Amino acid sequence: MSLAHGVVETPVFMPVGTKAAVKTLSSEDLEGIGAQIILSNTYHLNHRPGLEVIEKHSGLHGFMRWKRPILTDSGGFQVFSLSKHAKISDEGVKFRYPQTGEESFFTPENVIDIQKKLGSDIVMVLDQPAPYPVERQEAIDSLERTTKWALISRKQSLEDGQKMFGIVQGATFKDLRKRSAEELIEMDFDGYAIGGLSVGEPRDVFFEVLDYSSEFLPVEKPRYLMGVGDPLGIVKAIAAGVDMFDSVLPTRIARNGSVFSSEGRLNMKNSKYKMDTGPLDSECKCHVCSDYSRAYLRHLYISGEILAHRLFSWHNLHYLTDLVNRAKFLLKRGKLIELEKELELIYG
C-alpha cells in the first residue's frame, strides 16, 4: 500500500497514538520496534492541543516527529464510547468534552477538513457504530446515517497523496453488513474498514461477523478491522483476508502488568516471577527479552516504576509486529492455519 509518507506492507498492525503519542513510547521507539504506520484520533487532537498548534508544526508528522504514515480515526468510535456526552443528528455529532464541558460539532465535511489539516495519510469518514446488543431498526438507522455521511465525506477534496476509507456498519446482521459494503463500494473508496465490532459482542459472534463482512469487500482494496489487537484475533482476521488492524490493547495491558508471550498472556504481578531469572519470552528477540529478567521486570512494576510500563509496552508491540510478520510468511506458503491452531491453544 503506497502512501504519502511511505509504502506499507500488509498485513500490518498499527499502534495507537490517540493523542499523538503511543503511551510511554517515543516516535524513535516505534521505528525501532518496526511500526510501519500508526493511528491517531481526530476527536482528541481537535480538542487538545487543537489544530492551530499542530498546523504550526506543518501537521501531525512534524508535531510528533514521525516520518512514516499515519491513519487518523474520524471520531466515530467516540460516538459509541462517549455516547453520554454526544448528541447525534443527520447533520453530525455534537460532543461535550467531559473534562472541560466545551462543545464541538463534528460533521461529515469538517472531520475530513480536520484530517486534511492534520496531514493524515489515511483519513476516515465519520460513522455511527451500533452498540451490542442492538435492535434491527437501530442497526438500520446507524447504517443509513453512516452511508449518508460517507457520501458527503467522499465528495470532499483531499491533499495530494491522501487516501480516504469508508466504514462498514450493520451490527451483527449479515444482510445489513452486505448492504453497507455494497453502498460504500459504489462510492469507490481507497479502502474499507469493518467497523462496529469489539463493542461488547461475544467472541464467537465477533469471528462470525468478521468472516462474512470481509467477504463482502473487494480484494484489490485494503481491508481494515478496527479495534482488534489480541494475537488470536489478529491471526484469524488475517485468515479472513483483513490487511490492517489497530488497538490500544497491547499498551493498555502493559500498563496493567501483563504481556503477550509464546506461552500466552502473562500476569507479571504474579509472585511466581519474583525469583525468575529467565526472559519475558524465550522466543522473543526484542531488547527487553534480551536484556532483562522476569524478576527484574516484575520488581519494576511492583515498585511503581514507569520504566516497567515502557518496557512491557515495547515488548507487546514487538510481539505483535513479529507475529504479523510470521503470519505474512506463512500466509504466502498456505500454512497460516498452523499458526492459528498454535494460538488457539495458548490464547483460545
Image (tube, rainbow, N blue to C red):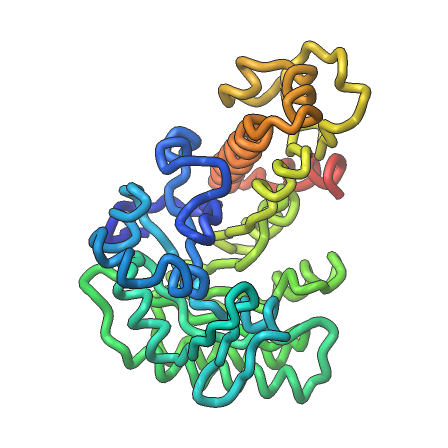
Asked where in the image residue 134 lies, by quadrant, the reply is: bottom right
Of residue 78 and residue 52, the one placed in the foreground of this image is 52
Figure quadrant of the C terminus: top right
Residue 244 place in picture, x, y as percent: 47, 52
Residue 140 place in picture, x, y as percent: 61, 86
Seen at 35% across and 52% down, the residue is 70
Seen at 62% across and 38% down, the residue is 255
Of residue 10 and residue 261, the one placed in the foreground of this image is 261
Residue at the front extreme, as displayed: 100
Asked where in the image residue 54 lies, by quadrant, the reply is: bottom left
Query: In the rendered image of this protein, does residue 22 appear above or below residue 241?
Result: above
Seen at 48% across and 40% down, the residue is 328
Query: In the rendered image of this protein, does residue 255 appear above or below residue 198?
Result: above
Residue 178 place in picture, x, y as percent: 56, 77
Seen at 43% across and 45% down, the residue is 21
Asked where in the image residue 340 lies, by quadrant, the reply is: top right
Q: Could one spot residue 199 in this view of the protein?
A: yes
Residue at the left extreme, as displayed: 160
In the image, taking residue 174 as reference, residue 60 lies left or right, namely left
Q: How many tags in the picture?
A: 0
Residue 18 place in picture, x, y as percent: 47, 53
In the image, taking residue 207 as reference, residue 244 lies left or right, namely left
Of residue 110 and residue 192, the one placed in the foreground of this image is 110
Q: Could one spot residue 219 in this view of the protein?
A: no
